[in-house]
Image: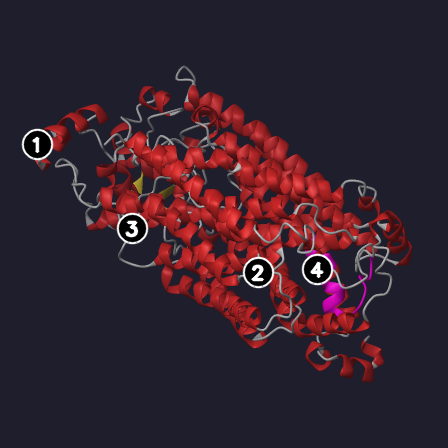
Amino acid sequence: MENELKLLVGAMVTLSLATSALVVVPFLQLKDEPAPAELKPYTSQELRGRQLYRAHACMACHTQQPSTTGAGIADASRGWGRASVAGDYHYDDPPLLGTMRTGPDLFNIGVRQPSVDWHLGHLFQPRAYTSGSNMPAYPFMFEVRNADDVADGEKIVHLPSGTVEPGKVVVAKPEALDLVAYLISLKRTYPVLSTEQANILSQSGATTEKEQVQ
Amino acid sequence: MNPTALLLATFILSIVGLFAFIWSLRKGLFEAESSGARTIFSTGEIGHPEEPSVGPAQQSALNEVSRTNLVADETKTSQAELAAREAADRSSALPAFVLIGCSVVWLIVASFAGLLASLKLHWPDLLTEHAWLSFGRLRTMHLNGVAYGWAPLGLLGLAIWMLPRLLRTQLLGGRLVIFGALLWNAALIAGMGGLAIGINAGMEWLEIPWQIGVLFAIGGMLVGLPMALMLTRRKVHHLYVSVWYMGAALFWFPTLYIVAKVPGVHFGVEQATMNWWFGHNVLGLFYTPLSLAAVYYFLPKVIGRPVRSYNLSLLGFWTLAFFYGQVGAHHLIGGPIPEWLITLSIVQSVMMIIPVLAFSINQHMTLKGHFSALRHSPVLRFIVFGAVMYTLASVQGSFQALRTVNATTHFTHFTVAHAHIGMYGFVSMVVFGGVYFVMPRILNTAWPKPSLIAWHFWLVVAGFAVYMITLSIGGVLQGLALLNPAREFMESVAVTIPWLQGRSIGGALMTLGHLVFALHVLLIIVRSGAFSLTERTTPATAAANPSLT
């Protein structure tokens, strides 16, 4: 090969083919995908919590995608919910799908574990709740204080006895509350169409927004 | 229209087009089958291995291994050509040194981040008081330290060093390279600091936000620009196979990064497909081609024998360019993205066997009859180890993309082990080998302690073997536990713990090897005359100051 122009043009053509397949066509195919009616946008507190979820790279160990294949078949039996669809991530920028299940899938953690106290205590010390867990503890999201040193409106974390020394209490910082608010908001229990149902609807040409989410 | 038929038609059409394209390029290479492969040798140089990291005894042993390659009618080497190469080496010395020097620093940073993250997975209560030392942040910093520090800077350093030799011209725009390297490092320092305090864009391989990351694109372009300048002034007619890989990669990276980071365009699940389009293409169209370029240069040079089949390398290049770009969606098998996209990526993942075999067979044929050179050349040991791991990682990757295999390995530590076969076993080992080759040429002095090279090699090979074997087993056990609805989730954690401990042992050995390597790099810099490079970038000043040479 002697011609550098041929080389570079060829190289850019192969890359644009790949870009069309993996970026442009999905862009066109998904851009009009409506949000399911039952899916609520995040509140500002939940968005702050989502920011913390990213900041601590929770997605390094937790997926948010009960899947249709493989481990996904077991997902439903663990209460992780139905397989996710594109519309479920309408308000997610970016979607935090994750690549690892060092910890469980969190797509529906708000359904499985709706207790604020549980989440706060679990973030403070996961091993006080689940023995054998290798999840990091996040003590820097909390303050350990004397029991008489708590102001009104501050959130005291109710922990299993023995987690901190007697006479001390654990107070959640706002960031811990934000993160838990986000985790509890993760509930996608509304029904969605199966692929077959969606195909039938699109062939009859009657895909209004209402019907897509039934 | 039936999407499967459409997909199949497109696929067949592209394959036909691809082969027509290769055929059109191949025409003209028939009559002089290996003339292209000989461009990296000066007149009379075939049969004379170049191995700057060894002493005279090993050099003569290497010469002995390569004796059969001597060309009868080319007995004299051309002094003019060798002087031109020396001038080319001088012109690239400082820019290549800056890039490689920075990459070694990032290697050490990334190694410690990775090792501590690994320890935390089985000692979760270790150092929990500081947010920046928590697992999630360390893992992210480890990934970015390797993906934007060690690997690209090391590979770009080798590329900048090789290009003037391959194009038989002096490096043009060396200052642009240095400026680009500084911008790149500034971006990485800012990006890593941001990750430590929790500024994370939330997409793997793209965690550093675009406001900082734009400097990677600019820095990458500045490092690539001299290649464009040199191509127009080159003194070789033929572009050697390494130039194709480097040329394409230097154009691919800025394009990939800019498309991935352009703000306000990507949304929802499309961001996930874009994420893995980038994530796999930065591997396949940046680190891989740059590493293959290094293998295609250093392996023939060290054994003094041109690459066997030039046509095979042409096939390997274009099939890699075509298939590798489209494999990314195999990271989202079973995920909430269009099914046709996943199928396309699985098909192209399997098609990757073609470029991989083309490369592997070619290297094997080149090395055939010269395996004893491995005993005498540290550079060759690293490079061949890397080439073998490329084959292993790629073939493993092709099978891992199949739905049946993926069902077990997806979401597990097996994927992490696989990633390390590619980025460590292949890319990092090739960079190590390349650095051992080029540093003595850049600094005009020999490695001070050859025994440290052997220590480095065996420490990282042992560490890597432990890492790969333990984590792969742990990943499969984890996957089997996750697949079985009858087993508690916590079982899938418990089964991995002993293997994660094993991985930490492997990682510690690798880190130790890296410290040996970094120490040796420091020693050769000190020996070369301590950081006074700028004063001796021309042979004239070097001759005037013999204490430095």
Residue B117, percent across and down? 53, 44
Same subunit, tags 2 and 1: yes
Which residue in the protein does label 4 denote? B40
Task: Report, in whole angstroms, how far the alpha carbon at label 4 lies from the one at label 3.
Answer: 63 Å
Given the image, on which type of amino acid does mark 2 rest?
Glu
Task: Mark 2 or mark 3: name the one nearer the start of the chain.
Answer: 2
Task: Report, in whole angstroms, how far the alpha carbon at label 3 lies from the one at label 1.
Answer: 47 Å
Mark in the foreground, 4 or 2: 2
Q: Is residue B355 left or right of residue B34?
A: left
Tell me where the magenta segment starts and ends, as one range: B433-449
Q: Quadrant of residue A166?
A: top left
Q: Is residue B515 left or right of residue B134?
A: right
Mark in the foreground, 4 or 1: 4
Which residue in the protein does label 3 denote? A174
* Label 1 residue SS: loop
Q: Quadrant of residue B298?
A: bottom right
Q: For residue A206, which numbered disc appears in the image?
A: 1
- Callouts 4 and 2 close, C-beta under 8 Å: no
Q: Residue at x 38, y 56 (%)?
A: B199
Task: Report, in whole angstroms, how far the alpha carbon at label 4 lies from the one at label 2.
Answer: 15 Å
